[in-house]
Image (cartoon, rainbow, N blue to C red):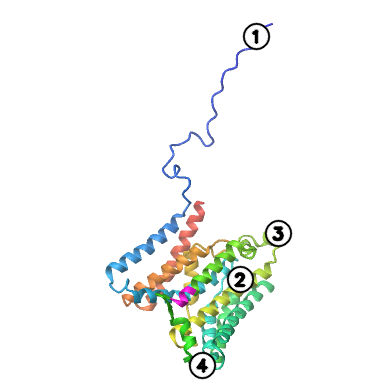
Amino acid sequence: MTDQSPAKTAEPAAAPPGGPRETPTWADRLPYLPHVPLVNLAFVGLALAVVVISGLTNDAFLTEGNLTNLLRQMVTTGLLSLGMLMVILTGGIDLSVGSVVALTGIVSAGLVEGLPVPLAIAAAVVLGAACGAINGVLVARFALAPFVVTLAAMTTFRGLTYVYSRTPISPTTPDFLTLGAENIGPVPMAAIITVVMFALGWVLINRTSAGRSLLGIGGNREAIRLAGVKVQRHLVLAYMLCGLCAGLAGVILASRVGIAQPSVGQGFELDAIAACVIGGAALSGGKGTVGGTLGGVVLLGLIDNLLSLYDVQSYWQQVLKGVIIAVAILARRREQQRT
């Protein structure tokens, strides 16, 4: 018996999801290229533009002396930004870092006159970490708003600085002054210390469970708590690391300048926050990279250096930094809306 059923005809191929496939673009033909947000490219272009404009319009910019001075100037902002990043990743903020710089700087300058230099430096850095730990305990244990806690700490630590000394202290110990003034080849020792700190920060965030926990706390605190992470412990760690970086920045600044003033550090928190935001950190937490923060530090350093070379008043520099922060936040928000 022969099969009388009708012959099956080939069915047309189903259209790809989303309609007909469009002609691939050049980016589609290069899938191995990493995705780089447009706003990141914009900031990189701005940094390159600053370098080119500075080199073409000012003969002093590309000199060895100016570049060395530029590296030294970026040390304080770099260390503060690295510590601030740890706090911002958790969704917090630390407004007291400038006061911690003043406190640890003047304490270290006073201690070196009666203690060995390494011990005096270590004591000042530990003091900075202790200041950060206090902030962390108040934020984590008592569930207080980071803005309120660190705003109160900013005033408290500044007052303690004046309690320790109402007048500037000029350290005379040569070994202490070497920390901020000595070069290793053409590179300042302080800049090398900063790069090492950034490398350690990168390892912490990208290669340790503690760093991933900081990101998770900023992304979804309740979910990370249910996953078994000790949220309070990691919050204290973040603020303690921020205080440690601020303490180290205060010691290096006092060593570089050769004088520790109780009034120093005002507005330093603005520079640190600006560098983090420019580098891609979200003030709501859960997003940010060490490399991006370092890029923000470099961009701000270049802008400050250029404005100083052209004798622009310091208050106009503050205006520009405020504008940069606002533009960076708007650009990052638009980027997040597109993704």
Which numbered disc, 2 or 4, marks the residue that appears first in the sequence?
A: 4
Cα–Cα span, label 3 and label 4: 49 Å
Q: What secondary structure is found at the residue carrying circle 2?
A: helix
Disc 2 residue type?
Ala
Q: Which of the labelled discs sits on residue 4, or is there none? A: 1
Q: Return the residue nearer the eye: 339 or 177.
A: 177
Q: Return the residue nearer the eye: 211 or 87.
A: 211
Image coordinates of residue 28 in percent, x first then y, are 45, 43
Q: Return the residue nearer the eye: 113 or 282.
A: 113
Cα–Cα span, label 2 and label 4: 31 Å
Residues at circles 3 and 4 in contact by the CB criterion of under 8 Å: no
Disc 4 residue type?
Arg
Q: Quadrant of the N terminus?
A: top right
Disc 1 residue type?
Gln
Q: Which of the labelled discs sits on residue 227, or is there none? A: 3
Residue 260 visible in the displayed image: no
Cα–Cα span, label 3 and label 1: 64 Å
Q: What secondary structure is found at the residue carrying circle 3?
A: loop
Q: What secondary structure is found at the residue carrying circle 1?
A: loop
Disc 3 residue type?
Ala
- Residue at horizontal 35 percent and vertical 78 percent from the top: 313
Write down the quadrant of residue 230 in the picture: bottom right
Closer to the eye: label 2 or 4: 2
Q: What secondary structure is found at the residue carrying circle 4?
A: loop
Q: Which residues are magenta?
A: 188-192
Which numbered disc, 3 or 1, marks the residue that appears first in the sequence?
A: 1
Q: What secondary structure do most residues of the magenta stretch adopt?
A: helix
Q: Which residue is mark 2?
A: 238
Image coordinates of residue 193 in percent, x first then y, are 50, 74
Q: Residue furthest front?
A: 185
Q: Which of the labelled discs sits on residue 166, or is there none? A: 4
Q: Residue furthest top?
A: 1
